[in-house]
Image (tube, helix red, strand yellow):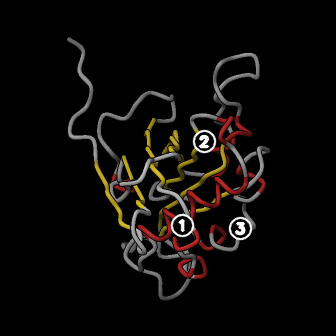
């Protein structure tokens, strides 16, 4: 058994139905305890695609990262190679994520988390648009990593139940590197917190 030295919490906010809606989201000023909008390094979107051959009933999805603390919008915009193919309508869900502890931030940490997400969910069924990244291997990870996903609505209130677009994501992911090959342990919250 190996010690879990790397534990990361990602606070996800959404769903937004357009880039404009997401860009208006503000977590607070720099004087407050909350992260500023620039602290969001992760983004995930799911929806329908434009063009011939893309059925309105079929959903596509993409998981992306930005390795600097200057906002995901530097990467996710109308010119994004995948996002530009998506319809901006009520079927589009955009989620933005920030590390719960910004002292843990580094480009390597952001990439390490992306590696685990793509290895876990990079199938044609779920993260359909991450084809190039599917080759990323968790063999590059040297330590056991635990990721905790916390989900919030656009008003930053904890979600009581998951939206369809994020149901495939687990609330807890452990990528264990105890042996030669990685082993994934996952868990979901069984019920919402209730006031007594």
Counting from the top left corner in percent of width and height, residue 127 is at 46, 70
* Quadrant, the N terminus: bottom left
Task: Depth check: give the residue in front, 150 or 174.
Answer: 174
Does residue 151 appear to the left or right of 136 in the view shown? left
Any part of residue 13 in sight: no
Q: CA distance from mark 1 to mark 3?
A: 11 Å
Task: Depth check: give the residue in front, 127 or 84.
Answer: 127
Above or below 166: residue 120: below
Mark 3 lies on residue: 80
Q: Upstream in the sequence, badge 2 or badge 3?
A: 3
Q: Secondary structure at mark 1?
A: strand
Mark 2 lies on residue: 98
Give neighbour class at mark 3: few <14, some 14-19, many 20+ (Cα, 10 Å). few
**Which residue occupies 35% across, 63% down?**
184
Q: Upstream in the sequence, badge 1 or badge 2?
A: 1
- Give the numbered dot on residue 166: none
Q: Secondary structure at mark 3?
A: loop
Mark 1 lies on residue: 62
Task: Depth check: give the residue in front, 15 or 106.
Answer: 106
Q: CA distance from mark 1 to mark 2?
A: 17 Å
Q: CA distance from mark 2 to mark 3?
A: 20 Å
**Which residue occupies 78% across, 54% down?**
74
């Amino acid at each position: 058994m190996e010690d879990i030295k790397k534990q990361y919490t990602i606070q996800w906010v959404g769903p937004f139905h357009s880039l404009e809606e997401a860009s208006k989201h503000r977590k607070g000023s720099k004087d407050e305890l909350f992260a500023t909008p620039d602290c969001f390094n992760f983004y995930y979107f799911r929806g329908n695609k434009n063009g011939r051959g893309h059925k309105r009933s079929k959903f596509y999805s993409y998981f992306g990262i930005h390795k600097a603390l200057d906002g995901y919008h530097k990467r996710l915009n109308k010119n994004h190679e995948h996002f530009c193919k998506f319809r901006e309508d009520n079927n589009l869900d955009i989620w933005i994520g920030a590390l719960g502890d910004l002292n843990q931030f580094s480009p390597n940490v952001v990439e390490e988390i992306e590696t685990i997400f793509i290895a876990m969910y990079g199938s044609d069924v779920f993260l359909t648009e991450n084809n190039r990244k599917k080759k990323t291997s968790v063999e590059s990870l040297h330590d056991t990593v635990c990721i905790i996903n916390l989900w919030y609505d656009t008003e930053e209130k904890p979600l009581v139940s998951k939206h369809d677009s994020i149901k495939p994501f687990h609330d807890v992911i452990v990528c264990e590197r105890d042996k030669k090959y990685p082993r994934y342990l996952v868990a979901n919250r069984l019920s919402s917190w209730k006031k007594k």
